[in-house]
């Protein structure tokens, strides 16, 4: 509804590109508030049905105002959330495209005019650029890194993707340096997933993964269920620890849906995916 209002207002001034962009930019606080309100939604059906329109609307705003940080950040978050929540399990190719869109929106915040060229930089130069990222950009760094890791996870058979792994790892490490507690300790979740999902030849280490999963859960006081979900899906399955897998998923399913009222949507998605993983336990063990 908010995006409909924004686009209706913009259409009244469509004769001038500068005026249109100014009108769109004025809506940034509204879009941020819309995102906050969406995060409080607990109804999984509403979440599922509204997300495609939401991310498409954000892309439209970005097309009009391509340097707007609010739009880019919400776009990066939105495309990751949609791909992970409702696409990846049934269509990995489409999810990969959505993860790349999320990553590229985030890159535009982090590297600005260098964003189109940053991925082609040698590793040492890329790492120098990453070191310049500051704490104010932690949200953008987080969604960019998480979407990139998700894309890599789905495409490890691609040699080019495999070569990007050290660059993505450098972004995780910078994220933890700047603020490991961000979003309920999710930078540690990102590192845990890296160690759990990568083959040993490219840095995988299940023991370190377990350490980082437990660190993330500790920081969130066990309330942010995404940590438990990924712990089950990537560590417990890899180690073939069925007891841990069942305990983690049971914890998710038994936790009240409003345990984090401002992030009810994430909890609802985790509960949905925990049920799906529970239904497929025999496929993993």
Image: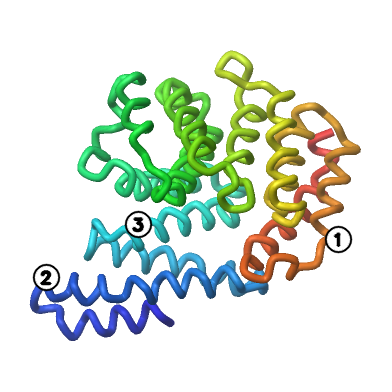
Judge from the rendering whether residue 172 lies leftward or rightward of residue 31; answer left or right.
Answer: right
Cα–Cα span, label 2 and label 1: 52 Å
Say if 198 sits above or below 200 in the image: below
Say if 238 sits above or below 264 in the image: above
Judge from the rendering whether residue 197 lies leftward or rightward of residue 225; answer left or right.
Answer: left
| Mark 1, residue position | 254
Cα–Cα span, label 3 and label 2: 19 Å
Q: Tell which circle, 3 or 2, labels the residue nearer the N-terminal end.
A: 2
Q: Residues within 10 Å of mark 1 (few under 14, many from 20)?
A: few
Say if 11 sits above or below 121 in the image: below
Residue contact between numbered discs 2 and 1, judged by CB atoms under 8 Å: no
Residue contact between numbered discs 3 and 1, judged by CB atoms under 8 Å: no
Q: Residue at x 46, y 38 (%)?
A: 148
In this view of the protein, which residue sits in the foreground, 208 or 251? 208
Q: Tell which circle, 3 or 1, labels the residue nearer the N-terminal end.
A: 3
Q: Report the residue that reaches farthest toward the right.
A: 243
Q: Report the residue that reaches farthest toward the top.
A: 201
The N terminus is located in which quarter?
bottom left
On the image, the x and y values in percent for residue 244 come to 86, 38
Q: Report the residue that reaches farthest toward the left.
A: 16
On the image, the x and y values in percent for residue 41 come to 61, 73
Q: Secondary structure at mark 2?
A: helix
| Mark 2, residue position | 17
The answer to whether residue 97 of the structure is visible from this angle is no
């Amino acid at each position: 509804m908010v995006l409909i209002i924004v686009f209706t207002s913009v259409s009244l001034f469509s004769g001038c590109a500068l005026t249109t962009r100014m009108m769109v930019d004025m809506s940034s606080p509204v879009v941020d508030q819309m995102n906050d309100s969406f995060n409080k939604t607990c109804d999984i059906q509403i979440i599922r049905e509204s997300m495609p329109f939401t991310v498409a609307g954000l892309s439209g705003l970005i097309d009009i105002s391509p340097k707007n940080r609010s739009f880019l950040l919400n776009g990066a978050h939105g495309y990751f959330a949609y791909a992970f929540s409702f696409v990846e399990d049934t269509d990995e190719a489409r999810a990969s495209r959505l993860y790349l869109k999320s990553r590229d929106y985030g890159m535009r915040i982090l590297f600005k005019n260098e964003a189109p060229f940053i991925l082609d930089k040698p590793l040492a130069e890329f790492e120098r650029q990453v070191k310049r990222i500051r704490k104010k950009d932690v949200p953008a760094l987080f969604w960019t890194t998480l979407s990139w890791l998700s894309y890599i996870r789905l495409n490890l058979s691609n040699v080019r993707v495999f070569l990007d792994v050290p660059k993505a790892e450098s972004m995780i490490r910078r994220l933890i340096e700047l603020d490991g507690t961000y979003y309920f300790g999710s930078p540690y979740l990102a590192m845990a997933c890296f160690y759990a999902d990568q083959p040993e030849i490219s840095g995988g280490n299940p023991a370190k993964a377990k350490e980082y999963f437990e660190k993330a859960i500790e920081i969130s006081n066990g309330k942010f269920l995404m940590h438990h979900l990924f712990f089950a899906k990537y560590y417990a399955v890899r180690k073939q620890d069925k007891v841990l897998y069942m305990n983690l998923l049971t914890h998710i399913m038994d936790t009240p849906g409003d345990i984090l009222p401002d992030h009810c949507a994430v909890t609802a998605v985790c509960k949905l995916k925990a049920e799906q993983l529970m239904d497929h336990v025999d496929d993993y063990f």
